[in-house]
Image (cartoon, helix red, strand yellow):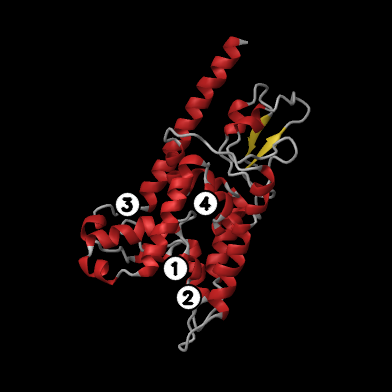
C-alpha cells in the first residue's frame, strides 16, 4: 500500500512539472517580445493577425498574437461587421479539439492564477450553492459584455466599445496597462478614473487568487465560458472507467475546480488539469485522444 502511495506521489509530481513546463513554454511562445517591456512598444507585425488560444492581451508589449476575446469584441463593435467568422471559426476548432484543456495548459492568465494560489496562505472554500450560482456569471459576461453590448451600443461613428476589455479584463491591466504606464510618462499623465477602476478589479482578483483557486476562470472568464460548451464533445477529453472505479472519491478530493467527477467527468467546469487522473489508485481515469 505504501509503495502504491509513493508511486502515485511521484507520478503526481512528474505530471505537475510537465504541466508547468507546458504552461511556461506557452507563455514564452505567445509572448516572445520581452524586450518591448523596456521600450513600452507594442509588436504590430503580421503575427498580430493570428489569435492565440488563451486569454492574452493584444496590447501586451511582449504579445505576438491577438486575444480571441479582444478580436471578437473589436469586430462586434465595428461599423462594417458584427461577427468575425475567422475568430468564431478559430475558437470552435480549438474548442472542438481541446475543450478547456486550453484553460488548464495554455492560458497565460490561468498560469498566473496557478502561481498565485501556491503562495502560502489559508485557502478558502466557497459554499457549494453560492459557487454554483456564481459560475453562471462568465456566461452572462460572454453574452452581454463580449457579444451584445459592443454590437448594439454604438457611438455617433457607428462604433461599439469593447466592454469586457475596457471595464473588466484583468489580463489587459496586468499584461498591458501597468507595463505601458511604467514605460510611458505621457500615458501615466493620461491615466484617470477608468484605469484606477481596472487596477482595483485586477488587484481584487490577484488577491482572491491567493485564497481561492482560479476565481477568474471559475466566475468571470468569457473565453473559458466559450470553450466549456465543447468540453463534452472535444477530441481530447478524460474518460472514467466505471467498471474499475472503486468510488474512493480521491479524484474529487484533489480536483481544484470542485468537479463531481463520478457523475460527469467532462462537465463544463473541468479545465483538464489532470489532477484527478494522477490521484486515481486504479488507473480508471485516462486521456482520450482519438
Mark 1 or mark 3: whose residue is earlier in sequence: 3
Separation of residues labelled 3 and 2 (CA atoms) = 29 Å
Numbered mark located on residue 161 in the image: 2
Between circles 3 and 4, the one closer to the viewer is 4
Residue 72 x/y as whole percent:
52, 68
Question: Which residue lies at the image location 60% right of the left edge and 26% below the top edge?
Answer: 279
Numbered mark located on residue 216 in the image: 4
Mark 3 or mark 4: whose residue is earlier in sequence: 3
Which residue in the structure is indicated by mark 3? 32
Separation of residues labelled 1 and 2 (CA atoms) = 8 Å
Mark 2 or mark 4: whose residue is earlier in sequence: 2
Residue 211 x/y as whole percent:
49, 40
Instruction: Judge left or right: residue 82 versus residue 40.
Output: right
Instruction: Judge left or right: residue 29 versus residue 110.
Output: left
Note whether residue 265 is visible.
Answer: yes
SS for callout 3: loop
Separation of residues labelled 1 and 3 (CA atoms) = 25 Å
Mark 1 or mark 2: whose residue is earlier in sequence: 2
Note whether residue 58 is visible.
Answer: no
Seen from this angle, which residue lies furthest bottom?
156
Q: Which of 251 and 47 is in front in this view?
A: 251
Q: Residues within 10 Å of mark 4 (few under 14, many from 20)?
A: many
Numbered mark located on residue 166 in the image: 1
Q: In this view, does 24 lie above or below 109?
A: above
Between circles 1 and 3, the one closer to the viewer is 1
CB under 8 Å between discs 1 and 2? yes
Question: Which residue lies at the image location 49% right of the left edge and 79% below the top edge?
Answer: 160
Mark 4 or mark 1: whose residue is earlier in sequence: 1
Amino acid at each position: 500500500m505504501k509503495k502504491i502511495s509513493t508511486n502515485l506521489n511521484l507520478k503526481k509530481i512528474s505530471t505537475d512539472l510537465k504541466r508547468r513546463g507546458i504552461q511556461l513554454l506557452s507563455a514564452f511562445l505567445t509572448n516572445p517580445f520581452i524586450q518591448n517591456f523596456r521600450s513600452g512598444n507594442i509588436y504590430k507585425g503580421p503575427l498580430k493577425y493570428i489569435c492565440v488560444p488563451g486569454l492574452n492581451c493584444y496590447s501586451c508589449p511582449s504579445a505576438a498574437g491577438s486575444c480571441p476575446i479582444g478580436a471578437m469584441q473589436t469586430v462586434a463593435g465595428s461599423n462594417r461587421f458584427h461577427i468575425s467568422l475567422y475568430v468564431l471559426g478559430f475558437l470552435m476548432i480549438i474548442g472542438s479539439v481541446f475543450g478547456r484543456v486550453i484553460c488548464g495548459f495554455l492560458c497565460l492568465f490561468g498560469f498566473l492564477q496557478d502561481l498565485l494560489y501556491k503562495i502560502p496562505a489559508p485557502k478558502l472554500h466557497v459554499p457549494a450553492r453560492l459557487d454554483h450560482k456564481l459560475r453562471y456569471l462568465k456566461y452572462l459576461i460572454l453574452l452581454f459584455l463580449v457579444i451584445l453590448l459592443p454590437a448594439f451600443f454604438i457611438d455617433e461613428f457607428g462604433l461599439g466599445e469593447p466592454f469586457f476589455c475596457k471595464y473588466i479584463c484583468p489580463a489587459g491591466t496586468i499584461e498591458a496597462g501597468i507595463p505601458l504606464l511604467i514605460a510611458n510618462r505621457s500615458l501615466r499623465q493620461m491615466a484617470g478614473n477608468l484605469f484606477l477602476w481596472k487596477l482595483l478589479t485586477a488587484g481584487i482578483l490577484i488577491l482572491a487568487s491567493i485564497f481561492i483557486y482560479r476565481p477568474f476562470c471559475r466566475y468571470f472568464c468569457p473565453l473559458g465560458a466559450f470553450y466549456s460548451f465543447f468540453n463534452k464533445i472535444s477530441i481530447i477529453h478524460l474518460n472514467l472507467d466505471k467498471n474499475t472505479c472503486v468510488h474512493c472519491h480521491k479524484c474529487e478530493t484533489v480536483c481544484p475546480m470542485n468537479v463531481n467527477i463520478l457523475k460527469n467527468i467532462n462537465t463544463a467546469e473541468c479545465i483538464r488539469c489532470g489532477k484527478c487522473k494522477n490521484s486515481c489508485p486504479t488507473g480508471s481515469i485516462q486521456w482520450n485522444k482519438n
